[in-house]
Amino acid sequence: MKFIRILLLFSLPFYFFSCKPQQKIPYYLDRFSDTAGKGVVNIPELKIQKGDLLSIQVYSLSTKPEIDQLYNLPVTPGASAGTGQTAGAAGYLVDNNGNIEHHRLGIFHVEGMSKHELAAEVKKRLTQPVELLTNPTVIIRYLNFRVTVLGQVGREGPVTVPGERLTIFEALGLAGGITDYGKKDNVKILRETDGKREIGIVNLSSDSLFLSPYFNLVQNDVVLVEPTKQRMKDADQQRAFQKISMGLTLVAAAATLANIFIKN
């Protein structure tokens, strides 16, 4: 038993070595002062991407609703008729070529277009060269606005929102927030624009945060929150301590068994 006590005493320095105080971690908007009433909020217009699911609803001055319905996909159960904003509503999927195929108006190349540009193109086909509908109105909505949050957050995974605007703070909030070991001053945003991937860096404590093109997220963005150096050190120390503890446990068990056999 004396040998076991020596082993336990030997393991104490490793335990205290692993219990280091945490370094100060930057908090959200650390460098901001009160800016009430200053600045203008600029919300970038979303561009349609491959994989987007779009709702296209058409209305006109026709007194016969069934005429308008010829140009609208049927609404599936659980969807709100005429809104095109519910996940259960039928939509047009943008394929790998950046196209959608309207069930009556044919193929549109929509990648890189805004909703307003696509609506104008649909309206054009409804009125030229033959007027199919009188003074048509076209409403387009995204049905699958989604970003993915990974890394040092409360809940990793995709974040789907019913609207079409999402800031990085809102996405992180929906993901459970950044943990104590996540870098708030070096959040990476992986984004695809015009078929090219780009990576942006966002400092959530910076006083220029709102000027960043990555403050407002776009559909299919990936938010990556990296661990701090302290987190990686703690993880390495924890693994080392676990290995040492396991080794000491095995040695102690062997010593106990040997002591039992010697006594017998």
Image (spheres, grey):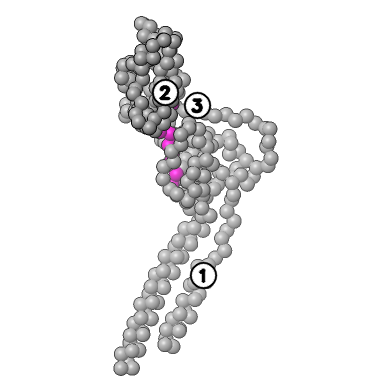
Circle nearer the viewer, 3 or 2: 2
Alpha carbons under labels 1 and 3: distance apart: 52 Å
Q: Which of marks 2 and 1 is in front?
A: 2
Which labelled disc corresponds to residue 264?
none
Circle 3: element type: loop
Check disc 2 and report the residue beneath it.
82
The magenta region covers 141-150
Q: Which residue is drawn at 49% across and 76% down?
A: 12
Q: Where is residue 128 in the image (x, y as percent from the top left)?
A: 38, 7
Q: Main secondary structure of the magenta part?
A: strand
Q: Which residue is drawn at 50% across and 36% down?
A: 166
Other-residue count near label 3 (Cα within 10 Å), few / some / many at <14 / 14–19 / ≥20: few
Contact, CB < 8 Å: mark 2 with mark 1?
A: no
Nearest the eye: 107 or 252: 107
The residue pinned by badge 3 equals 45
Identified by mark 1, the residue type is Phe
